[in-house]
Amino acid sequence: MITVKDLKKNFEDTEVLKGISYEVGKGEKIVVVGPSGSGKSTFLRCLTLLEMPTSGKIFLEDQEITDPKTDINKIRQQMGMVFQHFNLFNNLTIMDNITLAPVKLGLMKKEEAKENALQLLNRVNLPEKADSYPAQLSGGQKQRIAIVRSLAMNPKVMLFDEPTSALDPEMVGEVLAVMKELAESGMTMIVVTHEMAFAKEVANKVLFVDQGIIMEENTPEEFFDHPKSPRLQDFLSRVL
Amino acid sequence: MRSMTEWWADVVAKFVAAFITKDRWRLYLNGLGLTMEIAFFAGIIGIILGIIIALCRLSRSRNGGKTFLSVIAGIYIDVIRGTPSVLQLLIMWFIIMKNTTNSVLVASLAFGINSGAYVAEIFRAGILAVDPGQTEAGRSVGLSKSQTMLYIVLPQAIKNALPPICNEFITLIKETAIVGYVGLSDLTRVANQITSRTYEAFMPLIGAAVIYFVVIKILTMLLGILERRLRKSDNR
């Protein structure tokens, strides 16, 4: 589904990603963990070119994302992105937040998009918020809406950039529940997170990104119970 | 006691000479009309031009460098801010549009082009004040740069920019007082002309000042209401 080949990213003189290669299969749930500053968020943001890679190639199925001739807007329609700070459109109601892209990009008629949005809102138990504005919602509600906004585009893959890191502890559960349900529905997901319990439960593979490379990758059982590299052992001893 | 009566009679006579004789109040009214007409059209030109210039100025090429349009917009803002508005008006009047007979059009254009530079900087600040996360989210759902700007960033930027824009419009109303330089009879020039006819400066000049003040005070109050209403929608 997504193929990454020798991805490198520099910010001025700092080498943040030093060559990452990885392949994500259809329906796989990949959880990326690592210390702060390891490059895990940059890796995720490179996948939809929110950060322009310095070198390397990224493919979504057979389309090369990093090819300058590729229409990145078309690619992004197929890849949902959920941010740490939700980034709901402050000037629009929840309904308009969800329907704006499908309608303006000509994928759905207004009525059809609204119906679809209501179904999605029901799925996350927030149908009564359709006419509210983002400022009226709690953090957990905002993040569930942000997930729904991405789903409204029927993406092939969903990317999550620390989706629960900005939430109050009592709201983390409701967002993770939505993500679990999404995982069970067969969505391909790449999740950058600090929620180790979520990784254990949902991931097919866990990646440990440190110092700009994938230092270790394994199934959740092996990853958490038998970490190989000393850095991962050290990291796990501090977060678990 | 007698001197008090005399003083009062003098005040009344001066008032009559300044405002009543030969229906002179009509001149002030026409002058105010011209002032507001020029300010209104110049304001509209300024806002439209300002948005366009702000967008040009913020435009960036794929590798993050300034575009040609951005450079042009920067030069325009520099030139307008770096020269006196009276001079800009004179240049527009006597050089660029010397064959145009519609004097209100010429004045509106001169003031509009001047105001546009300041409005552009206000809008630029308003756009930059919108959280970059809003743009990232817009681009992430597949909207193009211009769609993201139009549907998400600009509406929020305009709300940010509204108070300083209103301020700029009030400045504009007062700045039109220099159209007397090219012979248009706005409120200020009317007051000045009547002074030279009655040889008495107090009543016409103070009178004109009061008229400006009242008009702008009313406008400020209306804008205050508008602003409060907009802010209310923030914590709906």
Image: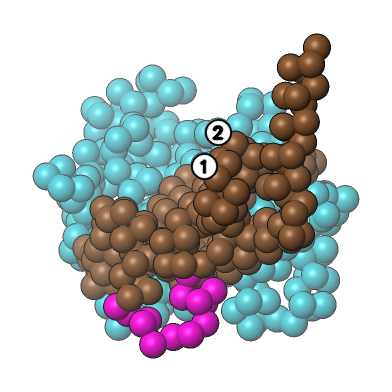
Chain colours: A cyan, B brown
- Residue at the location (52% across, 82% down)? B102
Tell me the kind of residue under disc 2. Ala
* Residue A166: mark: 2
Query: Up-down: is B207 above or below B119?
Result: above
The segment highlighted magenta reads B95-107
Residue B2 location, quadrant: top right
- Residue at the location (40% across, 39% down)? A33
- Outermost residue to the bottom: B99
Check residue B106 for magenta coloring.
Answer: yes
The answer to whether the residues at label 2 and label 1 have Cβ atoms under 8 Å apart is yes
Label 1's element?
loop
Q: Residues within 10 Å of mark 2 (few under 14, many from 20)?
A: some
The residue wearing badge 1 is A84
- Residue at the location (82% across, 64% down)? A119
Chain for numbered disc 2: A
Q: In which quadrant is the C terminus of chain B drawn?
A: top right
Residue A170 location, quadrant: top right
